[in-house]
Each structure stands twice: as C-alpha cells, then as structure tokens.
Image (tube, rainbow, N blue to C red):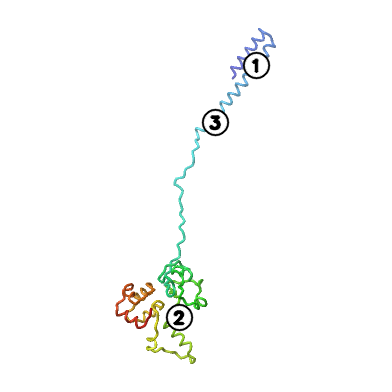
Amino acid sequence: MRVTALLASSFMCLYSVMFGLDSAINILKSRVVILLVGFMGLCISSYGFYLSYKTNSYPVSPVVGDTAPTHIEISPLNDAEDILVYVSGAVNKPGVYTLPNNSRVVDALKLAGGISKGADDSYIRSTLNLASKLADAQNLHIPWRNEITFEVLNQSLAETDQNSERLVIPSDTQSNVTLNINSCSKNDLLAIKGIGESYATKIIQNRPYTSFDQLISKVKLPKSVVDQLKSKFTI
C-alpha cells in the first residue's frame, strides 16, 4: 500500500508539472476512488477467506448418540382369569360355559341359548336376578315349571314344622316321588345307584330326551342303570 501511494504521489507531481494543477486534481480524485474500491474489495475478499478458513478448521457435524434410542414396549394389563359356570335346568343349551370374571347371570343365560318356554315363571319373576354376579364353579339352575326336587321337598316340610323339630322324609316317600329326566337337578341323578359325577354331568348336557333309550345312545349308560331311572323318572 505504501509503494502504491508513493507511486501515485510521484505520478501526480509529474502530471501537475506537465498538464496543470486542475487536471492533476481530477486525476487524483479518480485514483482515490479506484483505490477505495480496491481496498473495499480486498477487505471483502479477506473476510470471505477468513470465514472459509474458520469453517474448515472447525467442521460442524451432526450429533449422533452412541446407542440407538431404546424402544419401550408397554405391556397390556393382564386380563382377570375366566370363570367356569354350569348352567342347568330350563335353558335351551345347558352345559358348562367359560365367561370373563365379573360376568352377570344374564351373560351366562345368553351363552346357554336363553330360558326355555317351560321355565318356572314365578321363579323368574320373583327370584331370578339377571344382574347378579357369577362366581367360579357356580351352578346356575333355572327350574322348570312344577319342578320338584328332594331338596325343595325337604325344605318345604321343614318350614311347616311348628315345633322346630327336624323332620326326616321316609325313604319310601322319596321313592314315590317321580321326577322328569329333562328337568331334574344333578343331585337328583347322583342319588341313583350307578350314576356318579361324570354320568350326571353327561345326562344334563345331552338334554332333552324323548325316550330312555337315548340315555344309552347319547350318554352310554348301562342298561341296568337306565332301568333304575325308569322306575324313578319320567320323560
């Protein structure tokens, strides 16, 4: 820069001697403008070079974690255990059904095909609670119209005892009670010699029957047991 200024001054002195002072001043102004423009260009170039050098010296790279983000799986809550309910009596499809916990009586009856037309209307109106909760291993029994069981007979006789004495039904009285094989309870069947838990369950699950011979074909009952049923049950 000093050399350039010295040369410019020498040139202006020589020019002023040869062509006059005014011309020298005009030339000086134009030179000053050129020098200013050149200086500004030099500054801009220098600044650009500085920025380029700084960027190359300190490269910016994206931050990458050492490990991939952990994927957290939220396991659904375990459902409550199911319950088994035995639906018997005056229903279209008696049997053992699996239901979710906290199910109601109405849910079990839906699975059993609904209540049969021959059901006891008075029991349904006065006793049956469709909103009642079911329990595991519960026996939901819907009585048939005019259904009589040994348990009901015992209870009725006990309630009529005015002296609060325990009444016992003679065995010959029990033997004279005739039950319907399509509406009797499981306990009624278990009272028959030769019928255990398994046979009683199969008899109830394969209802209804139109003849005693179907007990042999459907349930595979021995003929001797069927003969006993004929003496105490009707169809």
Helix, strand or loop status at disc 2? loop
The CA span between labels 3 and 1 is: 32 Å
In which quadrant is the C terminus drawn?
Answer: bottom left
Residue under the image location 46 percent in, 76 percent down = 119
Q: Which residue is mark 2?
A: 146
Task: Return the disc, 1 or 2, that comes first in the chain's sequence.
Answer: 1
Among the 4 quarters of the image, the one containing residue 188: bottom left
> Mark 2–mark 3 contact, CB under 8 Å?
no
Q: Give above or below for 88 relative to 150.
A: above
Helix, strand or loop status at disc 3? helix
Q: Which residue is mark 3?
A: 51
Crowdedness near tag 1: few (<14), some (14–19) or many (≥20) residues, C-alpha within 10 Å: few
**Kind of residue indicated by mark 1:** Ser
In which quadrant is the N terminus drawn?
Answer: top right
Q: Position of residue 55 (x, y in %)?
A: 52, 33
In front: 115, or 24? Answer: 115
Closer to us: mark 2 or mark 3?
Answer: 2
**Kind of residue indicated by mark 3:** Leu
In front: 175, or 7? Answer: 175
Helix, strand or loop status at disc 1? helix
Task: Return the disc, 2 or 3, that comes first in the chain's sequence.
Answer: 3
Query: Residue 161 shows which numbered tag?
Result: none
Q: Position of residue 122 (x, y in %)?
A: 50, 78
Task: Return the disc, 3 or 1, that comes first in the chain's sequence.
Answer: 1
Residue under the image location 48 percent in, 70 percent down = 106
Crowdedness near tag 2: few (<14), some (14–19) or many (≥20) residues, C-alpha within 10 Å: few
**Kind of residue indicated by mark 2:** Asn
The CA span between labels 1 and 2 is: 130 Å
Q: Give above or below for 86 relative to 177.
A: above
Q: Which residue is mark 1?
A: 30
In front: 159, or 40? Answer: 159
Among the 4 quarters of the image, the one containing residue 89: bottom left
